[in-house]
Amino acid sequence: MTQKPYVIDQMISAKSIAARIEDLAAEIATEYAGTDKLVVVGLLRGSFVFIADLVRELDLPVEVDFLEASSYGDGMESSREVRILKDLRGQIEGRDVLVVEDIVDTGHTLHQVIDMLQTRKPARLKSIALLDKPTRREVDMKATWTGFEIPDEFVVGYGIDYAQRNRNLPYIGKVRFT
Ligand code: IMP
Ligand code: MG
């Protein structure tokens, strides 16, 4: 694919991300204190770095599973549907489930994933997003926990890609075309 040239300006440092995850993990550990049935579900691929850091800060018995969903349009943003490309390996009925997402943008992905998982009758179904772009929202959706609210900028790094590149950056940066 031909790519327009761009540079990446740092928006959130690796240090700030680490500090925020420590705080979030403490809140999550309080919420789930005493449970031994927590399944942390990472949405592939964007959440892979976040979930790795988050679970290592969680002082709880956890299982980790992954789900890959892909949104596709029919030309009308508001009727976007989400396809499951890779389903969970495990059962979640009666379990506490924490869905981990990289970014909530229009909200369609997380909204539809939550709706779909709800039909499997988990005990408690909650979600966490590293980033949230509230000004882009098309459906009423907010993750239970959010790392950072950001403006409407295209971001990369810390697992998040632009055309599959830049997932390996240790910080969150915004893409600026040059
Ligand atoms: P939503 O369904 O519009 O909320 O889309 C969320 C998904 O869009 C995220 O999981 C990302 O994969 C992708 N996305 C949204 N904003 C960005 C961005 O700034 N950079 C890279 N991917 C993004
Ligand atoms: Mg995603």
Image (tube, rainbow, N blue to C red):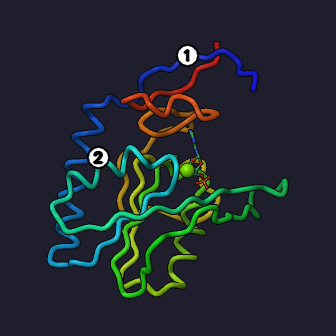
Q: Quadrant of the N terminus?
A: top right
- Circle 1: is it few (<14), some (14-19), or many (20+) Cα within 10 Å? few
Q: Measure how far apart labels 1 and 2 are at the Cα level.
A: 26 Å
* Image coordinates for residue 52, horizontal then vertical, percent: 32, 49
The reply to whether discs 1 and 2 touch (Cβ–Cβ < 8 Å) is: no
* 133, above or below 122, in the image: above
Mark carried by residue 177: none
The furthest residue to the top: 178
Q: Amino acid at mark 1?
A: Val
Q: Secondary structure at mark 1?
A: strand
Residue shown at 56% from the left, 76% from the top: 115
* Image coordinates for residue 107, horizontal then vertical, percent: 58, 58
In the rendered view, does 149 fall on the left or right side of 18? right
Q: Quadrant of the C terminus?
A: top right
Residue shown at 64% from the left, 18% from the top: 177
Dot 1 corresponds to which residue?
7
Q: How many marks?
A: 2
Residue shown at 20% from the left, 58% from the top: 58
Which-is-in-front pick, marks 1 and 2? Answer: 2
Dot 2 corresponds to which residue?
53
Between discs 1 and 2, the one toward the N terminus: 1
* Image coordinates for residue 160, horizontal then vertical, percent: 50, 39
Instruction: Determine the image quadrant of residue 78.
Output: bottom right
In the rendered view, does 16 fall on the left or right side of 133? left
* 33, above or below 147, in the image: below
Q: Amino acid at mark 2?
A: Asp
* 101, above or below 40, in the image: above
Instruction: Determine the image quadrant of residue 39.
Output: bottom left
Q: Secondary structure at mark 2?
A: helix
